[in-house]
Image: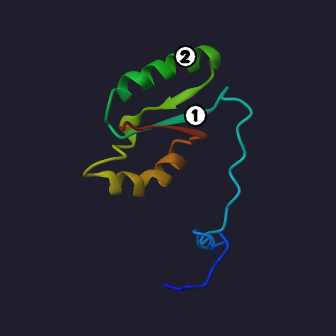
């Protein structure tokens, strides 16, 4: 231990390291959901089937031309087949012509 007086001042070091990944710009937001195709992704935990039904009902009232691709088309985003479902996701989103995604997960 040093006997040198520091008058109450101590060296401090910034606890964060330099950024390792550059920030990417976000995709442009949709102006409306009217006429858009919206995919539902779910991890098959805690009542997503009920929640997505309610969301569909409410969004169809607000945007009558909206269409949905049900979560069953994509498989579970959690659990045993998670890697397979997520690997297939980009292609499936293109196949269905998806404009937006609602991703539901339980904690």
Labels 1 and 2: the sequence-earlier one: 1
Question: Outermost residue, top direction?
Answer: 61
Q: Secondary structure at mark 1?
A: strand
Q: Secondary structure at mark 2?
A: helix
Density class for disc 1 (Cα within 10 Å; few <14, some 14-19, many ≥20) is some
Position in image of residue 15 (x %, y %): 57, 69
- Pick whichever, 20 or 8, lies toward us: 8
The residue that appears at 59% across and 39% down in the rendered structure is: 100
Question: Relative to 35, is 97 on the left or the right?
Answer: left
For residue 15, the mark is none
Position in image of residue 20 (x %, y %): 59, 72
Position in image of residue 5 (x %, y %): 63, 80
The residue that appears at 51% across and 46% down in the rendered structure is: 93
Badge 1 vs badge 2, beta-carbon distance below 8 Å: no
Density class for disc 2 (Cα within 10 Å; few <14, some 14-19, many ≥20) is few
For residue 58, the mark is 2
Question: Relative to 57, is 30 on the left or the right?
Answer: right
The residue that appears at 32% across and 36% down in the rendered structure is: 44
- Pick whichever, 100 or 95, lies toward us: 100
Quadrant housing residue 24: bottom right
Instruction: Give the answer, above or below, for where 88 lies relative to 22.
Output: above
Instruction: Give the answer, above or below, for where 87 lies relative to 107.
Output: below
Q: CA distance from mark 1 to mark 2?
A: 15 Å
The residue that appears at 60% across and 25% down in the rendered structure is: 66
Question: Relative to 59, is 105 on the left or the right?
Answer: left
Position in image of residue 82 (x %, y %): 33, 52
> Which of pointers 1 and 2 indicates the residue nearer the eye?
2
Question: Relative to 91, is 107 on the left or the right?
Answer: left
The image's colouring method is rainbow
For residue 37, the mark is 1
The quadrant of the rendering that contains the C terminus is: top left
């Amino acid at each position: 231990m040093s006997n040198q007086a520091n008058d109450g001042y101590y060296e401090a070091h910034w606890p964060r390291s330099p950024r390792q990944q550059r920030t990417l710009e976000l995709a442009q937001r949709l102006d409306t959901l009217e006429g858009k195709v919206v995919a539902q992704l779910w991890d098959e935990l805690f009542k997503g089937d009920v929640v997505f039904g309610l969301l569909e009902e409410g969004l169809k009232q607000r945007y009558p031309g909206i269409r949905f691709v049900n979560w069953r088309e994509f498989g579970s985003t959690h659990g045993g087949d998670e890697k397979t479902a997520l690997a297939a996701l980009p292609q499936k989103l293109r196949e269905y012509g998806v404009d937006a995604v609602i991703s539901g997960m339980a904690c």
